[in-house]
Amino acid sequence: MSSTPVTDSKAQGQQPPLKSYRGNCHCGSFIFTILVPEIVSVESCNCSICRKKGYLWVILDTNQGHKLEVVKDQGKLTEYVTGPKATKHKFCAECGTGVYAVCEREEKEKGKGVWVNVRAIQELKIWDLEVKEFDGKSIGPPYQPAPFDGLEPKAEVENGVVYHGSCHCGAVKVAVKTKGPLDKTFKEKVMECNCSICQRGGCIWTYPTSPSQISFSAGSRENLTSYACLKKVMCKTFCKNCGVPLTNETNEAMTEEIIRATMSDPEMVLRWRNVVWPINLRCLDLCPSDESWSFEEKVKELTIEKGDGWGMVKPGYVNP
């Protein structure tokens, strides 16, 4: 469903006309509409939660007639509270999609306390939008990532470099060994995908070629939940407490026979599931061997491929 112009009496004259946009979490448990000016730019915040979840915000201003209205709610949205303003981040417990956030104080005082993640809006071309940076990292005390306390990845990797990371709440802690440092010299594949689920998660994927390049702290797996997608062949994992996406894993229930019977290009899927174990770079916090490494600085140096998963995956996702 494409956005539809709406004439609003308050928008006549000085204020721009408002448009209605429809959005949803990936599994369709939560569907909503927003009424805002045409979305041509978004805000990207560098605070720890926004960075880990890849949020791109449009800020509603109720003083200008902006609205968020719920179309469908199956009660699967959950809430993660963070930051000095006790902002409530709403995400779907079923599929992990971050939908919107509410800062009650800002909403009450300024009418601008509801922030919608445009990644959840239907048929919006994210890569065409102007991105405005906001320095949320400077607000409040510095974020302290959970220290990794598990076994380091055991894989033998040429020029291997280990990185530690976690979800935002620290319930899931992970380490990955990459082939070379994650900086401008990194030659392995790094990709953002615009498929229906990766776009909603804001993921930046890199692709270890062995499962032993990734390890989790004890107890982390118990705090992960997975969401089966791509005809249920792959499972996106995310923290059940804070919703941060971490890996893209094979759904072991999908046998080769099922894949051949259901997928339009089964050979590609079978090759993929046997040779790569994707991890979302957004979850990484530090490099034990290089104290100067930071996600915010080094990710800008990486060559990030834009993958057209939306156009490649057939049959495609149907917006609810």
Image: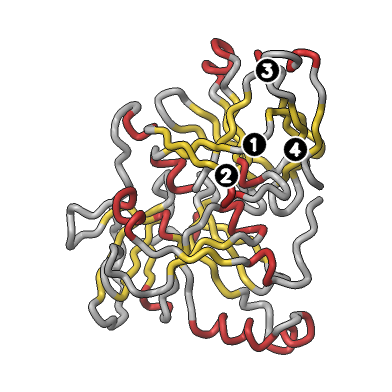
Image vertical order of residue 27 relative to residue 73, above or below: below
Query: Which numbered circle lies on residue 183?
Result: none
Residue closer to the observer: 137 or 41: 41
Q: Position of residue 273 (x, y in %)?
A: 56, 81
Taking the spot 50% from the left edge, 54% from the top edge, the residue there is: 223
From the viewer's perspective, tell me whether residue 188 is left or right of residue 180.
right
Query: Which numbered circle lies on residue 21?
Result: 4
From the viewer's perspective, tell me whether residue 285 is left or right of residue 23.
left
Taking the spot 48% from the left edge, 74% from the top edge, the residue there is: 277
Query: Which numbered circle lies on residue 15?
Result: 3
Q: Which residue is disc 2 drawn over?
A: 129
Q: Earlier in the sequence, mark 2 or mark 4?
A: 4
| Element under disc 1 | loop
Q: Earlier in the sequence, mark 4 or mark 1?
A: 4
Quarter of the view holding residue 193: bottom right
The amino acid pointed to by label 4 is: Tyr
Taking the spot 50% from the left edge, 32% from the top edge, the residue there is: 81
Q: CA distance from mark 1 to mark 2?
A: 8 Å
Tell me whether circle 1 and circle 2 mark residues in contact (CB < 8 Å).
Answer: yes
Q: Earlier in the sequence, mark 1 or mark 2?
A: 1
Tell me whether circle 4 and circle 1 mark residues in contact (CB < 8 Å).
Answer: yes
Q: Position of residue 295 (x, y in %)?
A: 33, 52
| Element under disc 2 | loop
| Element under disc 3 | loop
Q: Which residue is disc 1 drawn over?
A: 39
Image vertical order of residue 57 relative to residue 166, above or below: above
